[in-house]
Amino acid sequence: MFVNTRRLLVLNLVIILLIVVAGFVGYYFYNQSTLYLETDNAQVTGQQVTIAAPATGKLVQWKGSTGTQFKSGDTVGIVEVQQAGKTIDVPVTMPSNGTVVQNSAVQNEFVAAGTPLAYAYDMNHLWVTANIKETQINDVKVGQDVDVYVDADPGVTIKGNVSSIGLTTASTFSLLPTSNTSANYTKVTQVIPVTISIQGYEGTGLVPGESATVRIHK
């Protein structure tokens, strides 16, 4: 009899403990959904700068190796142009501050005017683009605080703010738009791009294209 009572007491304690744990878990998730809007459909990005050949000719000088930093107006290379029997050196200049992230130029190759020679980003002015479901976009406002977690650097929280909310869905200008010949549309939840400015990420090695998770404070 004593053994059965003891077992019943232990069973009741276990049930009560499970109820308490379930309550805390339920409250935690309810609290998170009430205070925050979270998505992992986000990516680090920035303004891509194209360094292009200013004229048709021979690329006789090139300094734009990957990782090299330039300021706006700096000479990255020189294109040698033949005009009316004369040789003219035309400088390839940097359109804005940035670091070369991809270089496709080869010194002494022949280039045509407008040919992209390299691509750069200003690593001091990166941001995060998060795609928010259209059913949740009303909870997003410019100025809201945001916690950013980058997959490449787990455990580190980058602070940010909502700086702008897109005026179209992400699929509006897709290179491969969905075709429809029957005039019957399958309803799919769309996403709207939200731009998040970030601060204090210098020294973290953040680069464009990295995946991220954002938590927007409602």
Image (cartoon, rainbow, N blue to C red):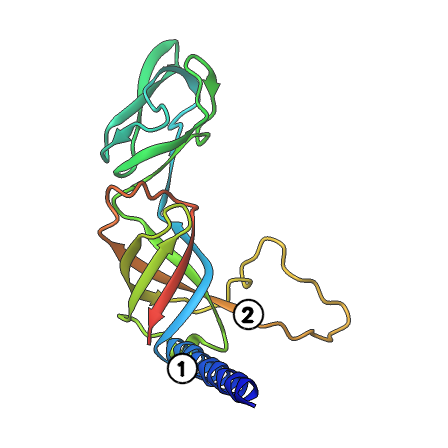
Question: Image point 51% across, 62% down: which residue?
Answer: 170
Q: Nearer the viewer, mark 1 or mark 2?
A: 1
Characterize the local packing of mark 2: few (<14), some (14-19) or many (20 or more) Cα atoms within 10 angstroms: some
Residue 205 in the figure: left or right of residue 171: left
Question: Image point 46% across, 30% down: which residue?
Answer: 115
Determine whether 42 is above or below 124 in the image: below
How many numbered marks appear? 2
Front-lying residue, 104 or 204: 204
Residue type indicated by callout 1: Tyr
Q: Position of residue 60 (x, y in %)?
A: 37, 13
Q: Which residue is mark 2?
A: 190
| Secondary element at image label 1 | helix
Determine whether 45 is above or below 111 in the image: below
| Secondary element at image label 2 | loop
Disc 1 to disc 2: CB gap under 8 Å = no
Q: Position of residue 98 (x, y in %)?
A: 29, 37
Q: Position of residue 64 (x, y in %)?
A: 34, 24
Determine whether 60 is above or below 154 in the image: above
In space, the residues marked 1 and 2 are separated at their CA atoms by 29 Å
Residue at the right extreme of this rendering: 182
Question: Image point 41% across, 66% down: which residue?
Answer: 166
Front-lying residue, 158 or 190: 158
Front-lying residue, 192 or 154: 154
Question: Image point 41% across, 54% down: which residue?
Answer: 212
Residue at the front extreme of this rendering: 1
Q: In the rendered image, which quarter is residue 59 located in?
A: top left
State which tag comes first along the sequence, 1 or 2: 1
Residue type indicated by callout 2: Gln
Q: In the rendered image, which quarter is residue 84 located in?
A: top left
